[in-house]
């Protein structure tokens, strides 16, 4: 079996199971440890039988519902490779926009001083680690309710050489009890309404952790909890940034306006023109 024949088989098999045909290339590159340019240069090379067998198995696993990212054990985020497994949500491109917008606001909101940032519900650590690496002067703390998720985040921080403090915590309650305060709080919390599970792909619902996906009847349960806890931990000036589900922007914005009446609150749209981020800038 030559490389191009294996890719052709995978493409056909994936399409017949309504999966992305490009997944085959990603899986084969992973197994061969090759960049795309190298793989394309080796299209007429013979595949070792063991690689071919493993490739078939992984393609079939993906067709059965396992995300490619879990099969290869990583995902790209903001130009860096993050380890992922079924204990963490797979980082999405939309969350990269949360990072970009936060960095832009950070420069405008604060004078030159040391700043404390908290990433709540960190999962793989993508937000916390990326913020630390993009703005090294930040003091970054990341929390998650699940020890298994924190294990993944800590490994990512170690591999990417990012100095981040990780804490097991249920939203902000631990920080409140410790009397800790932050200049910046970011979160990409669960925001999918419970009933949406019935119509979602098994690639998501069958493998990604439900604790990182679903949040009550309307998907807003975690934002409601944040509004009661955030006033206890925010410094002024301060910056709050949330990722939200499409169509939730105005609802979350109104919650922030109620919790912080003097804040400048804005809803931001992602590259697909969906309301995806809500920010609140707290004045001194």
Image (cartoon, grey):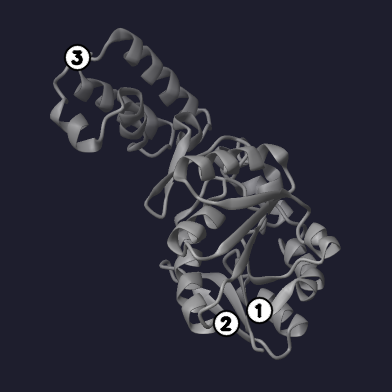
Q: Earlier in the sequence, mark 2 or mark 3?
A: 3
Q: Residue 179: which disc?
A: none
Give the percent coordinates (x, y) of residue 123: 62, 47
Q: Are marks 2 and 1 in contact (CB under 8 Å)?
A: yes
Quarter of image, res 185 = bottom right
Check the image and name the residue furthest to the right.
Answer: 177
Q: Disc 1 marks which residue?
A: 253
- Name the side, left or right, on which 195 lies relative to 116: right
Residue at 30%, 8% in the rendered image: 49
Local crowd at mark 2 within 10 Å, few (<14), some, or many (≥20)?
some
Q: Secondary structure at mark 2?
A: strand
Quarter of image, res 81 = top left
- Name the side, left or right, on which 258 lies relative to 238: right
Q: Are marks 2 and 3 in contact (CB under 8 Å)?
A: no
Residue at 35%, 23% in the rendered image: 31
Residue at 52%, 32% in the rendered image: 66
Give the percent coordinates (x, y) of residue 220: 73, 65
Give the percent coordinates (x, y) of residue 255: 73, 78
Q: Earlier in the sequence, mark 1 or mark 3?
A: 3
Q: Disc 3 marks which residue?
A: 46
Residue at 72%, 52% in the rendered image: 195
Q: Secondary structure at mark 3?
A: loop
- Name the side, left or right, on which 55 lies relative to 261: left
Q: How many marks?
A: 3
Q: Distance between the Cα atoms at labels 1 and 3?
A: 57 Å
Q: Disc 2 marks which residue?
A: 266
Picture layout, residue 144 above or below residue 177: above
């Amino acid at each position: 079996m030559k490389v191009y024949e294996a890719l052709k088989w995978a493409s056909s098999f994936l399409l017949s199971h309504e999966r992305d045909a490009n997944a085959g290339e990603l899986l084969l590159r992973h197994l061969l440890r090759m960049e795309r340019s190298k793989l394309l240069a080796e299209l007429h090379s013979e595949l070792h039988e063991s690689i071919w067998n493993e490739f078939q198995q992984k393609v079939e696993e993906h067709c059965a519902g396992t995300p490619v990212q879990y099969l290869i054990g990583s995902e790209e985020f903001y130009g860096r490779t993050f380890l992922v497994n079924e204990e963490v949500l797979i980082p999405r491109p939309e969350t990269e926009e949360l990072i970009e917008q936060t960095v832009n606001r950070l420069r405008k909101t604060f004078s030159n001083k040391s700043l404390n940032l908290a990433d709540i519900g960190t999962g793989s650590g993508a937000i916390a680690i990326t913020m630390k690496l993009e703005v090294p002067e930040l003091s970054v703390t990341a929390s998650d309710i699940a020890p298994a998720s924190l294990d993944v985040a800590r490994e990512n921080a170690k591999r990417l050489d990012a100095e981040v403090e990780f804490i097991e915590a249920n939203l902000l309650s631990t920080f409140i009890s410790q009397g800790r305060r932050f200049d910046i709080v970011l979160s990409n919390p669960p925001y999918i309404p419970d009933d949406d599970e019935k119509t979602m792909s098994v690639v998501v619902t069958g493998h990604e952790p439900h604790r990182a996906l679903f949040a009550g009847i309307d998907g807003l349960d975690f934002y409601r909890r944040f509004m009661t806890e955030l006033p206890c931990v925010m410094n002024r000036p301060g910056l709050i940034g949330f990722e939200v589900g499409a169509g939730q922007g105005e609802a979350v914005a109104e919650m922030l306006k109620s919790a912080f009446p003097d804040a400048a609150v804005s809803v931001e749209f992602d590259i697909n023109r969906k309301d995806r981020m809500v920010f609140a800038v707290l004045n001194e």
